[in-house]
Image (spheres, rainbow, N blue to C red):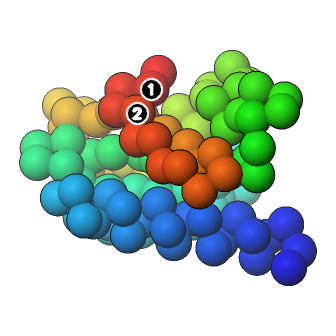
Amino acid sequence: MNKREVGSKYERIAAEYLTSHGMTVIEMNYRVRIGEIDIVARDGDYLVFVEVKYRADKEHGGAAYAISETKKRKIYRVAQWYMTYHKIPKDQYCRFDAVLIDNGEITHIKNAW
């Protein structure tokens, strides 16, 4: 598998995990010119923007260390674009989550940043 196929596989696993924990997946791989959000979901009153990271092992710090400050800023800008494009009110509760998959172990971090 190439990197994109591997990424898609683990994004599907993350979406299934979130769904099994009561969240509703709205969209996957939301892409615009400025970037991408892996999963857009609902969790109760919250609109949730989810970054999925997979690492085969924790040799270099694991999946958590793969989400840089630059990546977080880019996701934030794409989320703003998403909300504007879909006419989501500015008072909508939102959060940024991470689903980390390290060697098959899934960790869901709410309010990751």
Residue that extends furthest to the left in the rendered view of this protein = 44
Q: CA distance from mark 1 to mark 2?
A: 5 Å
Q: Hey, what amino acid is under mark 2?
A: Ile
Residue at left offset 55%, top offset 43%: 100
Q: Hey, what amino acid is under mark 1?
A: Ala
Q: Is 66 or 56 nearer to us in this picture? A: 56
Vertical position of residue 88 compared to residue 67: above or below: below
Q: Along the horizontal axis of the image, is 61 left or right of 72?
A: right
Under circle 1, the secondary element is loop
Where is mark 1, residue-wise? 112
Label count reads 2
Residue 30 appears anywhere in the view: no
Residue at left offset 76%, top offset 44%: 57
Q: Is 105 or 44 nearer to us in this picture? A: 105
Percent across and percent down for residue 3 are: 85, 66
The quadrant in which the N terminus is found is bottom right
Percent across and percent down for residue 98 are: 49, 39
Vertical position of residue 34 compared to residue 68: above or below: below
Vertical position of residue 33 compared to residue 89: above or below: below
Question: Would you say the residues marked 1 and 2 are in contact, meaning their CB atoms lie under 8 Å apart?
Answer: yes
Percent across and percent down for residue 34 are: 71, 47
Q: Is 56 or 97 nearer to us in this picture? A: 56
Percent across and percent down for residue 60 are: 84, 29
Q: Residues within 10 Å of mark 1 (few under 14, many from 20)?
A: some
